[in-house]
Image (cartoon, grey):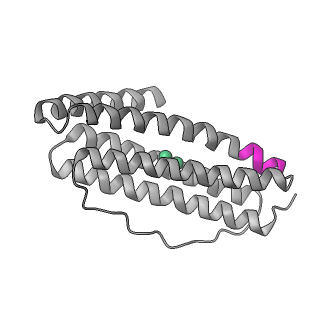
């Protein structure tokens, strides 16, 4: 079954949003690494890698369905974050924005009776739920320490452990 061009366009846009997230988290990883927060740096590097994988999953689907890949410009992510907390807030906000874009697409796909695309998108709904929960958790932890260096360094260590733990679970 051929996917309607309107849906193809939306899938290409979702792929672009995933690539932007990859770039944005890479920029945030740099924010932390430049300030010697190696744990938060590792955490965002891992998130960045995952966003790349989300984009690849969409790419493979488009290829499998034999539809054209439409490269789109990737926006430049913001760089001048005020604080570690601002980094997590921006990330949590972006995750919610991405979730909403998947919801909109999901609704369109359902209305059009594109069941194969709908089934494919289920994975993204679950993934967004997990990513929002993860970002919210860390945002709240960072908010708790109110910029205190001791608290931030403690969380930095925790973030490194979390990133390494998830990494080894994937292998
Ligand atoms: Fe993603
Ligand atoms: Fe994400």
User: Which quadrant would the N terminus be assigned to in this image?
Assistant: bottom right
Q: Is residue 171 visible?
A: no
Q: Residue furthest left?
A: 149
Q: Is residue 51 above or below residue 153?
A: below
Extent of the magenta region: 114-120
Q: Is residue 25 above or below residue 12?
A: above
What is the quadrant of residue 159 in the picture?
top left
- Taking the spot 63% from the left edge, 64% from the top edge, the residue there is 12
Q: Is residue 49 left or right of residue 125?
A: left
- Taking the spot 52% from the left edge, 34% from the top edge, the residue there is 130
x then y, percent, for residue 36: 15, 45
- Taking the spot 33% from the left edge, 33% from the top edge, the residue there is 140
Q: Is residue 73 visible?
A: yes
- Front residue of this view, candidates 85 and 19: 85
x then y, percent, for residue 16: 54, 63
- Taking the spot 27% from the left edge, 44% from the top edge, the residue there is 85
In the rendered picture of this protein, how many numbered marks are placed on residues?
Answer: 0
x then y, percent, for residue 123: 65, 40
Identify the main secondary structure in magenta.
helix
What is the quadrant of residue 79 in the picture?
bottom left
Q: Is residue 95 left or right of residue 144?
A: right
- The stretch drawn in magenta includes residue 158: no
x then y, percent, for residue 103: 66, 49
Q: Is residue 158 left or right of residue 18?
A: left
- Front residue of this view, candidates 161 and 128: 128
Q: Is residue 164 left or right of residue 73?
A: left
């Amino acid at each position: 079954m051929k996917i309607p061009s309107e849906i193809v366009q939306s899938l290409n846009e979702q792929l672009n949003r995933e690539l932007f997230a990859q770039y944005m988290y890479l920029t945030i990883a740099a924010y932390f690494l430049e300030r010697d927060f190696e744990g938060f740096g590792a955490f965002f590097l891992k998130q960045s890698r995952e966003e790349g994988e989300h984009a690849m999953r969409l790419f493979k689907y488009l290829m499998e369905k034999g539809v054209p890949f439409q490269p789109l410009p990737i926006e430049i992510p913001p760089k001048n974050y005020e604080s570690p907390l601002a980094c997590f807030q921006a990330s949590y906000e972006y995750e919610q924005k991405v979730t909403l874009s998947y919801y909109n697409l999901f609704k369109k796909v359902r209305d059009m009776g594109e069941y194969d695309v709908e089934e494919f998108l289920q994975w993204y709904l679950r993934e967004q739920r997990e990513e929002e929960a993860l970002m919210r958790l860390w945002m709240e932890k960072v908010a708790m320490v109110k910029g205190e260096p001791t608290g931030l360094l403690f969380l930095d260590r925790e973030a490194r452990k979390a990133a390494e733990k998830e990494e080894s679970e994937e292998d």
